[in-house]
């Protein structure tokens, strides 16, 4: 009996502890929802028990490396939020008013730039990968299906989404949420084939469409609508004489404008419905679509009537503004989990909140970020109708943790092959390559390299990527990606290449013309003749036989001129510098010539190979001193000059030179170069 009173406090204490644990778990689950992209809602997840999903995600992830990494990233976001809040405390009324006066003209400017004349469409295949698998395996229909692996899911069908299972979620979490989940491995070859069929249909309506992924395309049907208006609107779809007479009345003009916009919506809807029906007829798959005045709005609209539906946003300012401002910020393309959390911490949850807090955003964020947010809150993202310039291409692969260098190199090769194909299809080359490495602890490294040469093929990409990868080894990865940027149009590159060849030939002409001028007025002519007389006497025939390319003989003459001039300089007295010998007036150079002739007449020694390899002349293009006795050195320097890179002398004298006198094999080498320099040039 005496023990009974103490039991109640213990029970109450236990209950309190459980309540605290539940509260902690609930808080942690909410935090997990903020950290994980796969807790966000997708089409078909409207009635999902969000709290249950969050708790399962937390319990399944709390001991993982991914969770630990997510906590670190979340802490960085929290620190950023605290800094922003601290900064906002310093926003005085005067500063607020100053910022508002600066922002209002921007709002007015963007309002005048609002373009409602284009008709943009986003076509999005419904649960694409899963739909393909269900089409090819009817036994999967009506069952929760995901495509991917136990580590990561690429797509889920609507039956799986009812349980909270969605794309970008680990497969093991999906299995916990839905034990009946059927996971099918991916088959990208099959998906790519079907994607090409869809693109072929879309191209009939906009040849310049943009494929954002295998299952999504953006197109502008404005021109197609104008050319085929009667087909979709009927014979009475255009303006009539009665319409022109009605223009006299302002109210009737407004009514007419409303009627024209309404008919425009009808025509656009009919065209897009036709596109979707054609896609289904060819692929037996459904697609959803959004129609609006710009691609940002069309993308949002494409999600409204999924699956197998479409939505048209009226082409009027009032309807656009009211539509946008009612959107949750996460529904807007470009706002992810981090930005959603940052905005939420500032009390911003809708696009209208963004507009209302525009001054605070310009104070707390960078001007570029704040301006972008303000623009999308107004729904004025520009759609010029022209394809935007592409900045980069990228490919990546996710896999289970791998540390074997052979497998990592194999994966790198496959990724580069895919990226090389993308570059070829886009008609681009790249000058910068970035390697992305995600380790098994979910830390991410990026390594980049830039090249003066254009990377055009998968082999080019792999050559750079594999070197970057090997420098990071040993390591264990779960993702490897390659990005190609600093793009160059291959058509433009070919034009530049042709221009470069012409420029190169012009440079070679300068070489040969300078040789001709020296033959007429240069006092070194005596030495030229003396040195050429020492050769085997067959230089002319050797040149004629070896030089086959257009302009090749001029090139070889230029190289020979360098070699000959270098030997002239070697014959100069020790107290005569190279620079002074080439910059003197003709009269002074005559005196130098006399000195050099006297010096050579006193010496019976001939220049050695080292003398040829270590001789220096000013480049006729840039004026820098280069090793004129080395054909490879000459060629490399000319290449740099033509690219504007020869800012320093390419080949300076060695600190010490060892000369071998009277070596017959070396003398033979000199004669071979003088008689047939093209043979030596081939090694370059």
Image (cartoon, rainbow, N blue to C red):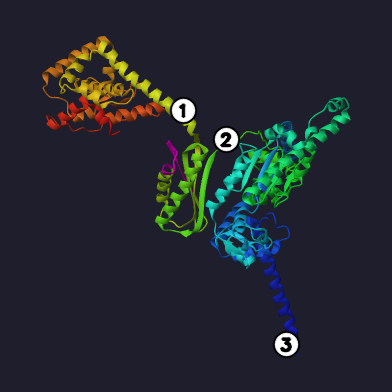
Instruction: Give the main secondary structure, helix, strand or loop, of the magenta stretch.
Output: strand
Residue 554 position in % (x across, y down):
30, 21
Which residue is tagged 2? 389
Tell me: residue 117, above or below residue 559: below
Q: How crowded is mark 3: few (under 14 residues within 10 Å), some or many (20 or more)?
A: few
Question: Is there any visible trace of residue 627 in the rendered image?
Answer: yes
Q: For this rendering, which residue is in front, 588 or 220?
A: 220
Discs 1, 2 touching: Cβ within 8 Å: no
Where, by quadrant of the figure, is residue 537 drawn?
top left
Q: Nearer the viewer, mark 1 or mark 3?
A: 1
Q: Tell me the tag on residue 3.
A: 3
Name the residue located 23 percent from the left edge and 12 percent from the top edge: 523
Q: How crowded is mark 2: few (under 14 residues within 10 Å), some or many (20 or more)?
A: few
Which span of residues is magenta-colored?
Answer: 446-460
Q: Distance between the residues labelled 1 and 3?
A: 97 Å
Whether 509 is among the magenta residues is no
Label 1, secondary structure: give it.
Answer: helix
């Amino acid at each position: 009996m005496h023990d009974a009173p103490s039991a109640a406090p213990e029970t109450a204490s236990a209950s309190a502890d459980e309540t605290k644990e539940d509260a902690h778990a609930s808080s942690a689950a909410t935090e997990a929802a903020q950290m994980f992209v796969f807790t966000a809602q997708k089409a078909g997840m409207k009635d999902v028990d969000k709290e249950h999903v969050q708790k399962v995600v937390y319990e399944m992830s709390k001991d993982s490396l991914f969770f630990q990494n997510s906590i670190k990233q979340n802490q960085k976001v929290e620190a950023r939020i605290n800094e922003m809040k601290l900064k906002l405390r310093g926003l005085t009324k005067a500063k607020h008013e100053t910022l508002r006066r600066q922002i209002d003209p921007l709002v007015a400017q963007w309002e005048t730039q609002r373009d409602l004349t284009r008709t943009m469409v986003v076509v999005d295949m419904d649960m694409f990968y899963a739909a393909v698998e269900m089409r090819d395996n009817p036994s999967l229909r009506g069952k929760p299906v995901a495509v991917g692996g136990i580590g990561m899911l690429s797509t889920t069908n609507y039956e799986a989404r009812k349980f909270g299972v969605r794309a970008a979620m680990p497969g093991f979490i999906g299995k916990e949420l839905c034990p009946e989940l059927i996971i099918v491995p991916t088959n990208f070859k099959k998906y790519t084939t079907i994607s090409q069929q869809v693109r072929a249909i879309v191209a009939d309506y906009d040849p310049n469409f943009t494929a954002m992924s295998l299952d999504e395309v953006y197109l502008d049907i404005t021109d197609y609508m104008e050319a085929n208006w009667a087909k979709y609107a009927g014979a009475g779809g255009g303006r009539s004489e009665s319409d022109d007479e009605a223009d006299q009345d302002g109210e009737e003009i407004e009514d007419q404008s409303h009627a024209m916009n309404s008919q425009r919506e009808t025509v656009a809807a009919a065209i897009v419905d036709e596109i979707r029906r054609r896609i289904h007829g060819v692929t037996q798959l459904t697609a959803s679509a959004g129609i609006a005045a710009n691609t940002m709005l069309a993308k949002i609209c494409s999600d409204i009537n999924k699956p197998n539906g479409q939505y048209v946003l009226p082409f009027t300012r009032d309807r656009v503004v009211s539509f946008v401002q009612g959107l949750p910020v996460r529904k807007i393309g470009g706002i992810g989990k981090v930005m959603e959390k940052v905005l939420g911490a500032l009390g911003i949850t809708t696009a209208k909140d963004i507009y209302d807090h525009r001054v605070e955003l310009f104070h707390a964020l960078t001007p570029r970020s704040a301006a972008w947010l303000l623009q999308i809150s107004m729904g004025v993202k520009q759609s010029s109708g022209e394809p935007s310039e592409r900045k980069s291409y990228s490919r990546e692969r996710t896999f289970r943790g791998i540390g074997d260098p052979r497998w990592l190199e194999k994966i790198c090769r496959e990724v580069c092959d895919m990226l090389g194909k993308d570059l070829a299809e886009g008609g681009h080359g790249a000058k910068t390559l970035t390697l992305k490495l995600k380790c098994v602890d979910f830390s991410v490294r990026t390594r980049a390299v830039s090249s003066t040469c254009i990377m055009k093929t998968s082999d080019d990409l792999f050559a750079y990527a594999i070197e970057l990868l090997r420098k990071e080894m040993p390591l264990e990865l779960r993702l490897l990606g390659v990005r190609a940027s600093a793009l160059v149009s291959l058509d433009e590159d070919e034009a530049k290449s042709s221009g470069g060849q012409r420029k190169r030939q012009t440079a070679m002409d300068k070489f040969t013309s300078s040789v001709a001028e020296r033959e007429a007025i240069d006092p070194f002519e005596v030495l030229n003749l003396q040195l050429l007389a020492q050769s085997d006497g067959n230089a002319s025939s050797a040149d004629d036989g070896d030089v086959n390319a257009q302009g090749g003989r001029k090139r070889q003459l230029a190289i020979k001129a360098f070699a000959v001039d270098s030997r002239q300089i070697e014959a100069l007295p020790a107290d005569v510098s190279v620079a002074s010998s080439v910059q003197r007036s003709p009269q002074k150079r005559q005196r130098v010539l006399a000195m050099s002739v006297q010096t050579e007449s006193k010496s019976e020694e001939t220049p050695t190979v080292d003398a040829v390899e270590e001789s220096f002349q000013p480049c006729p293009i840039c004026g820098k001193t280069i090793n004129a006795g080395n054909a490879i050195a000459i060629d490399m320097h000319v290449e740099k000059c033509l690219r504007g890179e020869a800012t320093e002398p390419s080949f300076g004298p060695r600190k010490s030179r060892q000369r071998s006198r009277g070596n017959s094999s070396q003398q033979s080498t000199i004669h071979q170069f003088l008689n047939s320099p093209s043979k030596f040039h081939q090694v370059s």
